[in-house]
Amino acid sequence: MSANQLSNRINQLAESATIKMSQKSNELKEKGVDVINLTLGEPDFNTPDHVKEAAIKAINENFTKYAPVPGYPKLREAICEKLKRDNNLEYSPAQIAVSNGAKHSLANVLQCVVEVGDEVVIPAPYWVSYIELVKLSEGIPVIVEAGVEQDFKITPEQLEAAITPKTKVVMFNSPSNPTGAIYSYEEVEALVNVLKKFPDVIILSDEIYETINYTGTHTSFAQFDGMIDRTVVINGVSKGYAMTGWRIGYIAAPLWITKACNKLQGQYTSGACSIAQMASLAAVAGDQSCVEEMRVAFQNRRDLVLSYIEEIPGFKVNIPDGAFYVFPDISYYFGKTDGDVTINTSMDFSLYLLEKGHVASVPGEAFGSPNCVRLSYAASEDMLTKAYERIKKVCAELK
């Protein structure tokens, strides 16, 4: 028996670059190096107390049996109320499916709708797992590139040019990981007008960063006339409520897609963790002031980080309107050296920051943008100040 017996499916699957760089950071930390890790998309806040109390209550009340595959009815009802309250979208609980995180929700949908050879249009920069999830579904990723000069957002003309008779799904992520870019109402409307020409194309709208938004307005593709019946909204509690480890995501979708996802999930994982679901019910239905407090803190950190970036020569960055990342174009440093290391790629640059500056980032190749690196600002202001002092110092050594 050997690794040669592994399937082509797993051999062709790329390792998550985010997790890989975080592991490199942790390895250095274990050797006693003071590394500042700005790789993972994880709020540094604790889960709100009322959410934790709901989980403790659920344990004490013995919510410890198998949960229904689609999720507890009360949670699905609360999600419907949230979608009406925050997004003016009408769904029934039967159209909601709760999974083990939004990544699981994405995987379920792609597995259920993508056939061998179907094309899936993905704007770049994209979240690292999109490409691999499409490949696992035996689909063909079709990448549409949008650089920093257009705020990392694709145009209607680019979208229309990418759609072919083989297109099955178009994926969108707003607010965006890794760029923080947000499509405005007018920008989404323009893309919707293109999509109306292709009525058989499904829209997969990843809205997991919805609440971490500095514009005051969130727009979903499902809001537009005729779009709710072909749009799958992906969301969850990880980012907005600092609940990454609880692993609860959900879809709101046309009933035929939700039923298919429940069928698949019934074989793969069954229902999500019962205790985490009861905690998520408290998050979605309870006091939302904690969400606003975290949003304000992230906005302050964004402004702080942007002020530091202005002091670093060669960093070309958009102003992120949401999420908690900056995604600077660092190609200015390609070909430069400190005498020991020459920077030729964003991976070289990330490794240089880690090894020389002891700051962990994620190279842009993983997001379909090889001129960039992703730096999270989901860290304290003191830690961010320290990190950017290091980045500025080591960048100055590259000539």
Image (cartoon, rainbow, N blue to C red):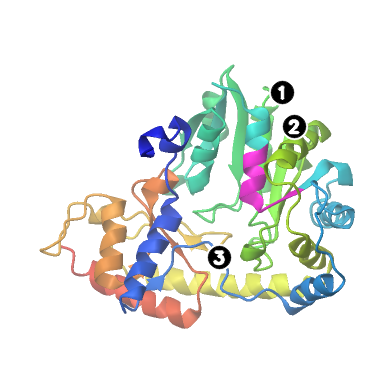
Front position in the image: 70 or 298 = 70
Q: Identity of the amino acid at label 1?
A: Pro
User: Along the horizontal axis of the image, is 341 left or right of 159?
Assistant: left
- Residue shown at the point (51%, 31%) measured from the top left: 158
Q: Residue at x 52, y 73 (%)?
A: 301
Q: Which residues are magenta?
A: 98-108
Q: Is residue 79 left or right of residue 359?
A: right
User: Which residue is more in the foreground, 81 or 88?
Assistant: 81
Tag nearer the camera, 3 or 1: 3
Of circles 3 and 2, the one toward us is 3
**Label 3 vs label 2: CA separation?**
30 Å
User: Disc 1 or disc 2, which is closer to the eye?
Assistant: 2
Q: Label 2: how many residues lie within 10 Å, few (<14), some (14-19) or many (20+)?
A: some
| Residue 220 visible in the picture | no
Residue 42 shows which numbered tag? Answer: 3
228 w.r.t. 28: above or below: above
Residue for point 12% across, 63% down: 340
Of marks 3 and 2, which one's residue comes earlier in the chain? 3
Q: Is residue 262 above or below residue 324?
A: above
Q: Disc 1 marks which residue?
A: 199
Pick the quarter of the image with the N terminus.
Answer: top left
Give amino acid for label 3. Glu
Q: Residues at badges 1 and 2 in contact (C-beta under 8 Å)?
A: yes
Q: Image height check: is 306 above or below 229?
A: below
